[in-house]
Amino acid sequence: MSDKPHVTIYTDGGADPNPGPGGWAALLIADSGHTKELSGAERTTTNNRMELTAALQALRALKRPARVDFYTDSQYLRRGVTEWMDAWAARGWRRKGDKAVENVDLWQALREETRRHAIAWHWVKGHAGDAHNERVDRLATAARRKLVGAGTGNFAPQYEIALRVSVPRGAETGGYAFRVRDMEADTVETHSGQVHKVTSNRLGLLAAQRALEHTPQGAAVRVYCPDDYLHKGMTRWLSGWQKRGWRTRGGEPVKNRDAWQALAQLAGARRVQWVLERNHAADFADGLDKLATDAARRA
């Protein structure tokens, strides 16, 4: 008899429209009867990405290796894990015909998580009366609706973020500065730092990451983007890159992919509105340019 604990997992996810705002959910049931519910949402995503995210988050929630009965109504997820995933990995994450695997970032992470556990994958028909399947469907829908309910025009943030970066001409060392305002507590904190061997574009992504890390998961956050690269990346380009396996429309690898992925993961755990600073007043950014420049020049 295995000493691994046994857990039953149900997951679901979807986007409406597809692609569009999406939600995911997971239900973990221990043999003792103890249950744990997880859910989350992303503003721009797909049905398939939400199904994979639900599975990934559920397995990550297991504190130690376990025997798992995993139930999903997604054949994309079940067949991907049981039939396709290892072959994709053996071909360098390419499908037959040398085509890029879509959602490769999630598949790679999921493959690592599945290796920790002994998993039996089960397909269950959706919306067919299975109480647990219906429960995760409701949770995923509620997470998506909560996100959509925040709106894009009448966004009421709990936190606001402004940021700046500086990479002096001819230098490889850059500085960043950001300010986070807690709207409810009416407090402001400012941070700066230095990064070596970096470009302005990459530094902007790293600064946004570090700023979001100063806000709690689930918070409503408005980020004032100082440039089009950050703004368009998070509002227009990201979903296409993910669907194409982190390739541009021209088939080239996306630059700064690791930084984009890390930023997308942080943003996905919050309700984030990305706005161009030049289109919105952000007076609390005053002084950040100098802080970023000073950080870049710091010995």
Image (cartoon, rainbow, N blue to C red):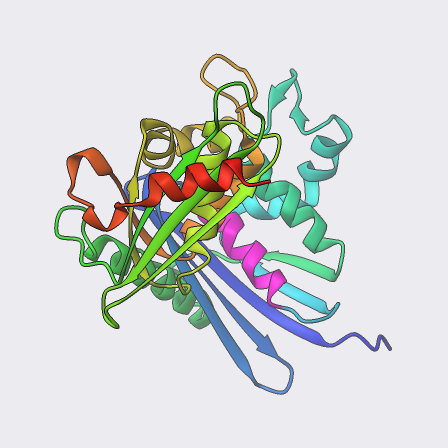
Residue nearest the observer in this picture, 288 or 235: 288
Residue 123: x percent and y percent?
56, 55
Q: Is residue 145 left or right of residue 2?
A: left
**11 in magenta:** no
The boundaries of the magenta stretch are 49-61
Farthest bottom residue?
Answer: 32
Q: Residue at x 69, y 45 (%)?
A: 82
Q: Is residue 123 left or right of residue 87?
A: left
Q: Quadrant of residue 270?
A: bottom left
Q: Is residue 49 visible?
A: no
Farthest left residue?
Answer: 154
Q: Is residue 234 left or right of residue 251?
A: left
Residue 106: x percent and y percent?
57, 43
Q: Residue at x 26, y 61 (%)?
A: 146
Residue nearest the observer in this picture, 280 or 164: 164
Q: Quadrant of residue 180?
A: bottom left
Residue nearest the observer in this picture, 125 or 2: 2
Q: Residue at x 66, y 21 (%)?
A: 96
Q: Is residue 291 visible?
A: yes
Q: Which SS does the magenta portion mostly show?
A: helix
Q: Quarter holding the N terminus?
A: bottom right
**53 in magenta:** yes
Q: Is residue 294 left or right of residue 170?
A: left
Image: 294 above or below 90: below
Residue 53: x percent and y percent?
51, 51
Q: Residue at x 56, y 30 (%)?
A: 198
